[in-house]
Image: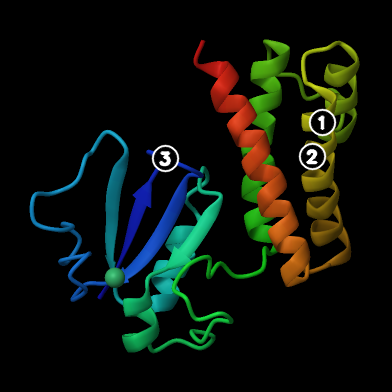
Amino acid sequence: MFYIYENWQAGPHKTVIHEGSCASCNEGTGRAGGYDRRHASWHGPYRTLEDAREAASAVAQAVVRNEHRCVKVNGKGPGRVKEGGTGKRTQRPLDANSLGTIRRRLFQMLDWAEGKASRDTTPMKRVIILRDQGKIPKNIANLMQTVLGFRNIAEYDDYVPTKKESDLITSAWEVVLEWHSANSKR
Ligand SMILES: [Zn+2]
């Protein structure tokens, strides 16, 4: 059985897939002493690694999707051997699906920046309008456009970002999320 640990306490919002027998997982209950439900939760069990991966990709807020080293030892799915082999940052290249998830989250962010939900124009144009109105800083607007641009070619041209591009998109998205969380809590 596989489980997903979701955490949003420090750093980027992330998911980590574990094998149930892993000491850190403990069949979805975490280490002895439990975990803080205010900024973490366990999902599962999932019968296969693929099921767990699918569920992890559906966690909309997550910007980092990792697999714990316990998965690499015991996992039965393809593609479990990751470059580096450090057990950190083993996310797969972003596909149209995960970029779509990011885009939906970005929509909510634009609604927040504008103060209302508006769907009259494309998100790309909206970013430019909100930037020109001073509601989104220029550097953040650039990063939003990067993310949206890759999503559009993934969606319409079936383009799959390379590993480096995926890293770039993930980093851009992390900066956008940091900007949003720093400003939306005031
Ligand atoms: Zn584990």
Per the image, the residue denoted by label 3 is: 10
Residue 123, quarter of picture: top right
- Disc 1 vs disc 2: Cβ atoms closer than 8 Å? yes
Nearer the observer: mark 1 or 2; the answer is: 1
Looking at the rendered structure, the kind of residue marked 3 is Ala
Query: In the image, is residue 179 above or below residue 64?
Result: above
Query: In the image, is residue 181 above or below residue 170?
Result: above
Nearer the observer: mark 2 or 3; the answer is: 3
Compute the Cα span from label 1 to label 2. 6 Å
Looking at the rendered structure, the kind of residue marked 1 is Asn
Element on which disc 3 rests: loop
Percent x, y of residue 87: 44, 73
Residue drawn where x is 47% and y is 64% of the image: 66
Element on which disc 2 rests: helix
Percent x, y of residue 65: 50, 60
Q: Residues within 10 Å of mark 1 (few under 14, many from 20)?
A: few
Per the image, the residue denoted by label 1 is: 139
Image quarter in which the N terminus is found: bottom left
Judge: label 2 CB < 8 Å from ligand 1.
Answer: no
Per the image, the residue denoted by label 2 is: 143
Percent x, y of residue 108: 63, 28
Tell me which label, 2 or 3, sits earlier in the chain: 3
Q: Residues within 10 Å of mark 3 (few under 14, many from 20)?
A: few
Element on which disc 1 rests: helix
Residue drawn where x is 59% and y is 18% of the image: 183
